[in-house]
Image (tube, coloured by chain):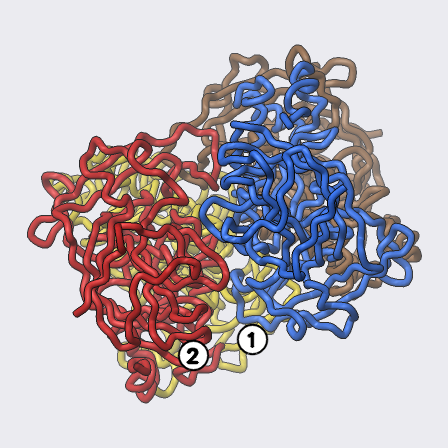
Chain colours: A yellow, B red, C blue, D brown
Amino acid sequence: MRRIRQPNHAFVYTLSAEHQPVATVACNETVCIETIDAFEGRLRSSADLYSQKCPGPPRANPQTGPIYVEGAEPGDTLVVTIENIEPTEAFAVTALIPEFGGLTGTSHTATLDDPLPEVTRLLPIENGTLRFDESRALPLAPFVGTLGTAPDLEAISSLTPGYWGGNMDCVETGIGSSVWLPVHNEGALFFIGDAHARQGDGEVTGVAAEMSARVTVSFALKKNYSIRWPRIETDKYLMAVGSARPLEDAARIAWKELIGWLVADHGFDALEAYQLLGLVGEMRLGNMVDPNYSMVAKLGKAWLPSESAAGNSQTPEQ
Amino acid sequence: MRRIRQPNHAFVYTLSAEHQPVATVACNETVCIETIDAFEGRLRSSADLYSQKCPGPPRANPQTGPIYVEGAEPGDTLVVTIENIEPTEAFAVTALIPEFGGLTGTSHTATLDDPLPEVTRLLPIENGTLRFDESRALPLAPFVGTLGTAPDLEAISSLTPGYWGGNMDCVETGIGSSVWLPVHNEGALFFIGDAHARQGDGEVTGVAAEMSARVTVSFALKKNYSIRWPRIETDKYLMAVGSARPLEDAARIAWKELIGWLVADHGFDALEAYQLLGLVGEMRLGNMVDPNYSMVAKLGKAWLPSESAAGNSQTPEQ
Amino acid sequence: MRRIRQPNHAFVYTLSAEHQPVATVACNETVCIETIDAFEGRLRSSADLYSQKCPGPPRANPQTGPIYVEGAEPGDTLVVTIENIEPTEAFAVTALIPEFGGLTGTSHTATLDDPLPEVTRLLPIENGTLRFDESRALPLAPFVGTLGTAPDLEAISSLTPGYWGGNMDCVETGIGSSVWLPVHNEGALFFIGDAHARQGDGEVTGVAAEMSARVTVSFALKKNYSIRWPRIETDKYLMAVGSARPLEDAARIAWKELIGWLVADHGFDALEAYQLLGLVGEMRLGNMVDPNYSMVAKLGKAWLPSESAAGNSQTPEQ
Amino acid sequence: MRRIRQPNHAFVYTLSAEHQPVATVACNETVCIETIDAFEGRLRSSADLYSQKCPGPPRANPQTGPIYVEGAEPGDTLVVTIENIEPTEAFAVTALIPEFGGLTGTSHTATLDDPLPEVTRLLPIENGTLRFDESRALPLAPFVGTLGTAPDLEAISSLTPGYWGGNMDCVETGIGSSVWLPVHNEGALFFIGDAHARQGDGEVTGVAAEMSARVTVSFALKKNYSIRWPRIETDKYLMAVGSARPLEDAARIAWKELIGWLVADHGFDALEAYQLLGLVGEMRLGNMVDPNYSMVAKLGKAWLPSESAAGNSQTPEQ
């Protein structure tokens, strides 16, 4: 299996078609990608404070990429299956960063209040757990915080999630998930980074258990198949991710994309799908701290018509 | 066990201290309460449309109560444990109501768009399931949509959730849950109604599987113990419910109330609790359709210090 | 002209049909109403801090009323014209209140940040101005912060604005304005209070120049004429006030109510009115600190069809 | 005076440092810039519908630029004074565009409702007015809808306003205004377009009176003077523009930037400035339709300390 590394550690901080691809992959290829943590390795002890060590937005959340996917054209959908996520260091790190997070005044929810104190907390990785403190060893539950394709025309900070994916910070993009991303540029131009050893819903402090990781992914294409917002498929769920502010708009986007999927691929009438989701749909808070907030709408596959469930949504063209 | 029925079917439509109590209970009593569905039994076939059969806000969501709890005084917390929920009819009902719901223009997210078509859908209850259509039998997952105490001074529509509880529409208030509610009036003045046979997260159409039900609850009091927002305890979780708009404010309220709980009862420092929730906290969308939206913040009890977990939070004074 | 005073200084803190009327007026009567300031006269020097002197929500913002308007029935509209507002003390007062205001964490935009310092500032009224400090004498620009009718069924804190009017905190309800309010109860049940010597847009600190005042108002009725949200008419403008969170919903409500007015009374097609407002409509921030935020949508009367402008909207039936 | 035209009509659709400058200006130079309307001249009759004639986001809102300003470096502030705005065609145009605008479901406030009908309306420019219909000639009140500098690192759609300025759609950027913009790249890289013949507050339909125009601007620099968000100065006002969702965050940003200005340049204490704005501050809705919404906070210069008012804020270094 091929390894992909960012040449010269020259990570990128935007999702954009302006960057030169660092690798080209075949559309059915599986590769192992080296990613660096969101602080670019600068926080290595509790004495390393963000405001002193890190340059801050928008040069934050370093990404590996773009990776050019052969055959991908605007109007297609790229399906990225996350096969594995392995930490490459013996610790993850979390932090409180001034004017960032869900329970403090921020750059946008601007207040005159003093910021919270700054904290860096190392989280040793031990026997498949993350040591939070003496009495708590949290299970590793790794996922990829940021993955996406280059947006159409724009170059967007890797801190921001949107229709292109990006910094969704959703635990659903973990091992075994297939993430569907819209293709807006030739080659799709895939970016990935910001692995998390685990995270609470909403990433409420603004920072998960950030780690450097080797991420194994395989690529597939759905040709001439357009989506507006990212979708995720697991063996149990169909999901869609909306990213916007306020959170209700993120929720509306996610529900509507999921309904669109059910109508397009699974034979639902839109209002019937709406009513079914009203009874069995699930929605979890992805993040409430990034420039856009993310919500994940889910339908258990048990509720799909059986012929569809066995059908094309599970077998993207390769 | 005593049964409580609303006399003369004179259900109430506000949570308020102005109503005469319909029953008085001892603070350690268990009672069985008859509740009627949110449409007050008026939608009994798919031909019964809401706009023709129901009076609409604010005379909606009929409640049984108030129930006066002996010994409850302002500054206490009422703990209501839901022991059982039994449907009293052979069906539940769901609907699409004009200008109501998460994916349509509403009275407050006001648009010039035409409303969605009106729909009533009967959901027969069969063998512990809810029949959605020919091919889908949804498991019953009953919970109480609305329960709360009389607010301080105000009389609030039973459609609206807030610090008093009310129409939170959260699946967490199901069988086995203990719901903590602030006491703002002598006798607490407890209201309950709006049982749901099941509901998707967010109650996205605005309507769950509405049913009439017999709800068995037991009461307990935490004397001289104040809470700002409702809390829920199960064998696995400590939870808090925030209700506000936009959704991020509902989330902020819920997280902060949960942190306050951890600090007050479980020996946490506030910022330590914040960081722990950032890694293991959970947050689910309660409702995004009522006058206030609800979010539920959760911490698994596994993460509590062991001495606290075994301690006072599980055994309210009776 | 008759004077109306709250008997025994027993001001009320909710807008509700439960209160006993304190006076009955004819539907074309002009009366002079005594109102007390929002702090109920408790802050009389800079040493009087809110947290020490005032009971806090929901027993805040004392109102005079309800005033029963003869002939008013549900389905009518009450038109209250503000003829005069006279301060009754030699000062107004403003303050910073913990966890309240536009640029600080609050009860609903809940944060873990420390609150801002508490401040009380006396504002002497001198020669038609308000003394802010040695070098600044602000012109008096008095208006009524809170006025409304009893809502349907509910009893709502006088801190909260909504479809019933209430604590809109909009400078547009000043001398010469006619405020249209929906009638949901027999006698309309009018409440008034919270006079402001002046206020900046948004009442951003949460507190205006609060003063006790004598307010002269005249009443008129539009029989069998329903409105959903408050409207205001001056010699220059038609206006509607929306109160909700987030602010965009307050804006949407206000625009839609204004368009409804133009369609109902002034011969507009809805989409034509929408396009005209897109070019000449005005919108000012009313408040961004109360339990609901308020926005005011305006159309200059110059843009009305001339026959309508001369017609019925200026002469409510009396 | 020099004219600047976009070479080959190759307008740009992002604000970004990736574009090649189309002109270089001295930092005290006055130039006349040709801008094209937001529809790039494609809507020329009421039969020209947006969905048929225009490519849609993100290739919308064509800009002239970037213009390289000599001497501008990151950490400076660019002051652009708008000297004149002259229409270059005999008409402006407005429209209703599907899933865009303040009173309809949109891409982000996603609903299942049918979109509003599509409409294009030509607005002839006659004798200094804009003809809306037979009976209404609206005064011209031209301003620049979009102007900004290249953001730091990102390439942002010219439809989006933010800290870099961009598509603020605020009537305050009209003739006589000085717009302060942060410099994040060498040469500042200034973009301008989207002239409006006039607009209502909020641009509620999503479209103003769009026109092509010649805009005369002069440039100045404040060296080593950083701002976080755009500011505007006229002879009467100091203003700041916040752009975010929801609207209350746009408001918070604008108020805080204005307070920061008063503290930095005019000798205010932050809480004193906050209280003064609470009494005399003004806030108008800029737009509620673009990817971020804009609010404009204002303080009349009459309230500045006299020595400051006569001082450095009016005379940027050149």
Report the residue at 42% width, 51% height from top.
Answer: B157
Up-down relation of residue B188 to residue C151 (above or below): below
Residue D128, image x, y percentages:
78, 18
Labels 2, 1: one chain: no
Q: Where residue C14 appears, x then y in whole percent?
A: 55, 55
Q: Specify whether D201 is left or right of D54.
A: right
Residue B313 lies, with reference to residue C212, above or below; the image says below
Label 1, on which residue?
A: A118
Provide the chain ID for the residue under circle 2: B
D107 in relation to B294, above or below:
above
Q: Please state, as top left, top right, bottom left or bottom right, where the N terminus of chain B lies in the image.
A: bottom left
Secondary-structure class at tag 2? loop
Q: Amino acid at mark 1?
A: Glu
Q: 10 Å neighbourhood of mark 1: few (<14), some, or many (≥20)?
A: few
A236 vs A259, nearest the viewer: A259
Image coordinates for residue A102, horizontal then vertical, percent: 49, 64
Task: State the residue at coordinates (20%, 42%).
Answer: A313
Chain of the residue on which disc 1 is drawn: A
Contact? badges 2 and 1 (CB < 8 Å): no
What residue is drawn where x is 30% and y is 53%?
B201
Total number of numbered discs in the rendering: 2
Residue neighbourhood size for the residue with mark 2, other residues' Cα within 10 Å, grouped as few (<14), some (14–19), many (≥20): few
Residue where numbered disc 2 is placed: B225
Q: Which mark is residue B115?
A: none
Judged from this view, the residue extending furthest toward the top is D134
Question: Which corner quadrant of the image does residue B308 belong to?
Answer: bottom left
Left or right, residue B72 beside residue C234: left
